[in-house]
Amino acid sequence: MTASTPAFHLAQINVATLRHPLDDPRMAPFVEMLAPLNAAADGTPGFVWRLVEEGVADATGLRPAGEHVIVNMTVWETREALWDFTYRSGHLEAMRRRREWFERHTEAHLVLWWVPAGHLPSVDEALERLAHLRAHGPSPRAFTFVSSYTAEEAARHLAAAPPLLGT
């Protein structure tokens, strides 16, 4: 690994509870946004990877968090790259309209965590991080944009922490 190659990347998962099935006409504007937004993410500087269902261009058919819950999981080189895509691109329009398509969550629906560069997290790993955030609040293990940690802080914390026996 060279000095310019990052040791860690930022992973994220967010979950969204559907107001209506994806084939409902009220969901059409969201469904129509998916391909262009995914293509934009894929082409954004700092983008590394996103979860997709085998043979499909997105992950909307995967329902690991419940029948009416869709997931979005990605990995980015930096927090700034993810922030810029989320809040400084066409993705912001989808965020502004999210209440048309998704229920309001009463608990955390997004979690961020650092992974070694080259590691692609599993859905189970991601959902464990979300459960940890919900149970314990932000920490270097599982955090949010508002309460974030650097990769170095997370590495120090995880090196010093005893192994988790659960969330």
Image (cartoon, rainbow, N blue to C red):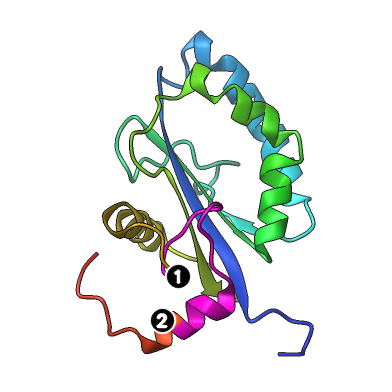
Image quarter of residue 28: top right
Task: Check if mark 1's residue and mark 2's residue have beta carbons within 8 Å.
Answer: yes
The N terminus, quarter of image = bottom right
Residue at x-position 74% and y-position 81%: 5
Task: Say if residue 119 shows up in the picture.
Answer: no
Q: Is residue 100 above or below residue 94?
A: above
Who is closer to the viewer here, 107 or 14? Answer: 107
Task: Please report whichever mark, 1 or 2, sits nearer to the chain's N-terminal start.
Answer: 1
The C terminus, quarter of image = bottom left
Image mark for residue 140: 1
Q: Check disc 1: other Cα within 10 Å, few if <14, some if 14-19, many if 20+.
A: many
Left of 44 or right of it: where is 34?
A: left
Q: Give the main secondary structure, helix, strand or loop, of the magenta stretch.
A: loop
Asked whether 27 falls inside the magenta stretch, the response is: no
User: Circle 2 sits in a helix, a strand or a loop, which is it?
Assistant: helix
Q: How many marks?
A: 2
**Label 2: which residue?**
158
Residue at x-position 43% and y-position 81%: 157
Who is closer to the viewer here, 76 or 167? Answer: 167
Q: Check disc 2: other Cα within 10 Å, few if <14, some if 14-19, many if 20+.
A: few
The amino acid sitting under disc 1 is Pro
Looking at the image, which residue sits at the far top? Answer: 25
Who is closer to the viewer here, 46 or 51? Answer: 46
Asked whether 145 falls inside the magenta stretch, the response is: yes
Q: Which residues are drawn in magenta?
A: 141-156
User: In x, y percent, where is residue 87?
Assistant: 69, 41
The amino acid sitting under disc 2 is Leu
